Image (spheres, helix red, strand yellow):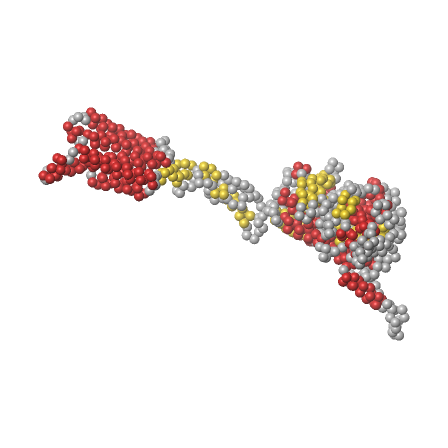
Amino acid sequence: MTSKRWWVLSGFLIHALLCAPTQEQDPDSEEGEEECRLLGKFDLRGYVEAENHMHVIGGMFPIHFRTILEEDPTSTPPNSPKCEGFNFRGYRWVKAMIHAIHHVNERQDILPGITLGYQIYDTCFTMSKTVENSLAFLTGQNETTPVFRCSSGAPLAAVIGAGGSTLSIASSRILGLYYFPQVGYASSSSLLSDKYQFPTYLRTIPSDAQQSKGMADLVHHFGWRWVGTIAADDDYGKYGVKAFKEKVEVGPTCIAFSETIPKIYSRTKLQDVVGVIKGSNATVIVVYSSDIDFHPLVEEMMISNITGMTWIASEAWVTSALIAKPEYFPLLGGAIGFGVKQGEIPGLKEFLLDIHPGKDPDDDLAIEFWQSAFNCTWPNSNISYNTDNRKNVTGHENIVDFSSDTLCTGEEKLEDLNNTYLDISELRITYNVYKAVFAVAHGLDKLRMCIPGKGPFVPDNHCAQIDEFEPWQLMYYMKNEMEFKVLDEDVDISDKGDVFTPYDIINWQMNGTDEIAFVRVGTYSAISEASDEFYINNDTIYWNTPTRTRPRSACNNNCQPGYRKGIQQGKPPCCYDCIRCAEGQISSITDARECTPCQEDYWSNEQRSACVLKEVEFLAYEEALGMTLIALSVFGACIVLSITGVYIKFRNTALVKANDRELSFLIQFSLVTTLMTSILFIGKPEDWSCQSRQVTLALGFSVCLGCVLGKTVTLFLTHLARNSKVAEKVRMSMKPIFQKIIVLNSILTEVGIVCAYLILQPPRMNKNTQFLNVKIIFECDEGSILFLNAALGLRLAVHKVN
């Protein structure tokens, strides 16, 4: 603060030295020659009422849309640019500020006995005019001497403005040097929250940081993955889109394209933007722009007949009558935007109607308003209106002057006028202007009520005087104690100069009178920088699509169930290929990132969207092979049983007895058991069937071969006895019981092997999926190959002995 005051004092000193006459005149110099001169004067238009008031509040408003560009500004002496394109909306803001100052002056609870004046200038929605206005506020005159304020009227307390964010940034950099308080009503750029760059800037409109977060929540709410952005080529558009991208790309959404609208009209650049829109498959577009900048692009898109788009509107144009025209509804119908909090200002309608060019012949703005509103020329007036000096403008390339030859009579009825000026149904920015005036008034009132000795200023805790104070002293109250009430609304401006007021989510719909209605379909409220609330009623939204349903905006078609997303090299993650899931894997949801393998007993269906049970395969009884095995087993068992019947019939004969009748019956029993064991190999395998078929087969063969071994030993000894007396003695001493012992030993050995087999590693039912992926082959896992070979080897050994 000390350094700033030093520079101000230094400026005074330098100016005094430069402008003071010299003590000794050069004899060759002309008498009365000035040592310093003004570089130029400004052509400022607006309203000034500074006499008989204690303090003045400055105001900057876009009463016109643009300045008239000079062909070659270096060929003639530079002049302050002229403006054209009367802005009814901006003119209403001017009247709202004057109306608010009248309300403050009428009240006794705020600044009693003190009246405020105003000094309002037209920014023409350009930076050059805004800078001119800022310098005029500092000097009190329309001259470029910013270090001195030489106005004969009341001192300037604060400035309201300057409309767009870029304009407020430019003016705040100048006014902030001298610590003049500035309250914005429509500048929402998040850059203005930086108190290091803009220490004296406050505002009654929420920051774009809040709006961008709400837009991102809106896009995520409707599941839009592929979104385009269009921004005005200024700080408002660029920083707004930047904040939106940072918020929306946290989720699954990508930016399809980012285009800018030129600040200086260029049809070629606008056609390039339209070409990008037409060439993109994004159906949702976010537009961060003022209505003035967006309007030329809308005109160009209407010529190109662009339809079927869903537009996300920023607060600067969502309720603008310049854009919300019925003829634009095929293009912009169904737009969803964020509107700042609206309010009703008492007496404003009557104040707006209290205007007539005949009341003040010097009020050139009132005359231009009347001429533009009723398209007539005021008698004896040389004030131009409805001019457009831009080149190659869409729709009227060769026309410059749209004025009428009809003279105004003064009897025209404002009540019959249907334009933005008298439309008080959506007082949003106008309401912010009203609150901005009361913010300055409450700051002055707090300064007035300071108790001597308890003030905030050093030394000695002194107070500033209401009739004479420095701008930085008023800034103290506006920065640290800015809580007040306006029309039953509590206004709280934070130390960063921001307010946290809710947004209305607005949907463009056509009403019964073929006019565009701003239907409130939801709310977004940023309670603080870290907390917000989002609500929207989907059922009340009008969608500007052929089916009147919520549009889909994606880089490509969704991957249906049975497919997964595959990355496309060099493209955003929202663009992907749909790859079919491999066999045995499925995806049951849309846009699956990965395919899920099926469980062991399942396999993917033909669509790869669900897992189904695999087909089970085993040797069934109904199959030909199974029936053949059963038939052969039964046939073999019948043959053996028939032989058994013969043996039973002739069991007492010498032949049967000589052949060891018991062993013969045992052999026949084992053969029947072995033949019938094949039935256990048919049907769905179970653990018990796998175990029983191997055990039964092993024991049956062992019994059979053991009996044969016993008989073989007897026959072998009989054969040897023919040639050996020793063998004859052995054969004679061998009893029938010994044959049975041989059989028993063979069976016991086999039983031991089988028991170890069943205990240590028994056979079990196995689901074989190695040969066919789509089928499960039910088979028996034979368990230990060692024990199985041991059992088989024993049988082969017995057979070999036989």
In the image, residue 147 above or below residue 624? below
The residue positioned 44% from the left and 40% from the top of the image is 600
The residue positioned 72% from the left and 53% from the top of the image is 192
Name the outermost residue toward the bottom: 27
Which quarter of the rendered picture does the C terminus lie within?
Answer: top left
Which quarter of the rendered picture does the N terminus lie within?
Answer: bottom right
Residue 658: give x, y in percent of width and height. 16, 30
**Closer-to-camera residue (431/720):** 720
User: Residue 187: in sight, yes or no?
Assistant: no
217 sits left or right of 708 in the view: right
564 sits left or right of 720 in the view: right
**Closer-to-camera residue (103/642):** 103
User: Residue 357: in sight, yes or no?
Assistant: yes
Residue 264: give x, y in percent of width and height. 73, 54
Residue 205: give x, y in percent of width and height. 74, 48
The image quarter in which residue 762 lies: top left
Image label count? 0
